[in-house]
Amino acid sequence: MDLNIIGIMFKVGKVLALTPQSQDNQKSNNFQKLYAIVVFLLCTVCFVMNMSYRTLFYDDLSSVQLLLFVFTDVDRYLHNVYTLIIVMIFKQKEWFKLITNLRKTCVKASKTSQLLTFVMSHAAFLVLFVFVFHISVRSLGFAIGIQLYFLEYIQFYCQFYYMLFSCIILKMLLLRYSYQKFLLHEEIKMIQKRSFYRNSKSLKKIQCNIFCLKESADIFSDIFGGSILLNIFFNALKSLIYLERIIKNGYLGGMSIVSLGQIGIMVFFWTGTIVTVLRCDAVLKKFVEILRLSMKLEVISSDMTKDKNDQIRSFIDVVLHNRPKFTAFRFFEVNRSTIFRILYSIVTFLIIMIQFKLN
């Protein structure tokens, strides 16, 4: 069962109050909410202190650079607000609804694939941030490095954790939609052989699963939509910061090794965001394939009895009205075109910055 990875994610996430303590303990107790509030207050205090340290380094920045850096800091803090307050206090029950739906539509999957993704992504995160912290300490000193970057690295992990968790859940949804396509394809074969009565229960099972998976996609958007939105903003802001430096210096050589480490972080998060968007699009594409098979089912059953045709039309209606949709906190839908829209926005703002420089 591929749900084992969720138990592992919960064991890791509960340390920073990012997830419920267990996928089996569905009772939301006051201790969990209190712990999330305590962690949030600690993050808030550290954020205020961190911003006071950073003001000394922000004095030499231009107005455009200052805005980009401040917006990036605020974006990371808003991610803490979203995960610790909105998700863990107001949407904690959504986690268990999602797990219940995934359990209902469970499919056979490799236990090692998701675990390998978890291990390899954490290893990459650890190597990257140990390297970045090392060069930060060498350049600025241990005390200043801790003051400036310790909280930032904790916030980075929270962003990374939700990004990884969203990719894992999307993989589960994709596997389940693929299995519904397989079942529907087998059903079509049986109908072509005029064995409809033997497999009529299978059609009802697919119908129930499609409805359940649509609900799971909605819950996914409720839990991870805000994180996806903030990660997109974070990536865009980070990109603009370093593109602005390239414009200012005229070449990459003008950047310090600390800046190059930060670019590595930006590439790491861009990769995770693009994978998330593409997996959302893969689920939508798989649903379209199911819809096409449903239409084919209607065509090949046109010469059957009225009762059989009514049952098939009922099935097609369920499929048509349960198309999955992924949103970024309900601001926009997440699909393949999202990548183009992000790049378009970055290029537009970059042109504005170039005009500022020319003036």
Image: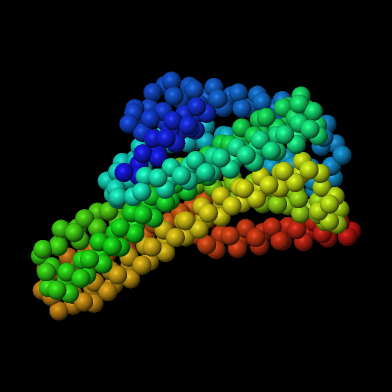
Query: Percent x, y for residue 106?
Result: 29, 48
Is 348 situated above or below 77? below
Looking at this view, name the residue that lies furthest to the right.
Answer: 359
Residue 322 visible here: no
Q: Residue furthest bottom?
A: 303
Quadrant of residue 78 in the image? Answer: top right
Q: How many marks?
A: 0
**Quick check: 240 left or right of 272?**
right
Q: Residue at x 70, y 52 (%)?
A: 239
Q: Quadrant of the N terminus?
A: top left
Residue drawn where x is 14% and y is 74% of the image: 193
- Observer able to see residue 345: yes
User: Is residue 344 found left or right of 17 in the rendered image?
Assistant: right
The residue drawn where x is 81% and y is 34% is 139
Q: Nearer the viewer, residue 268 or 123?
A: 123
Name the colour scheme.
rainbow
Q: Does 273 appear above or below 315?
A: above
Image x and y of residue 111, in percent: 37, 44
Quarter of the image that includes the C terminus: bottom right
User: Looking at the picture, does residue 136 appear above or below residue 67?
Assistant: above
Give residue 72's quadrant in the image. Answer: top right
Q: Measured from the top left, where is residue 219 in percent x and y?
A: 40, 45
**Looking at the picture, how far across and down is residue 76, in whole percent?**
63, 38
Relative placement, left or right, of 137 versus 208 is: right
Residue drawn at (56%, 36%), measured in percent from left and top?
A: 158
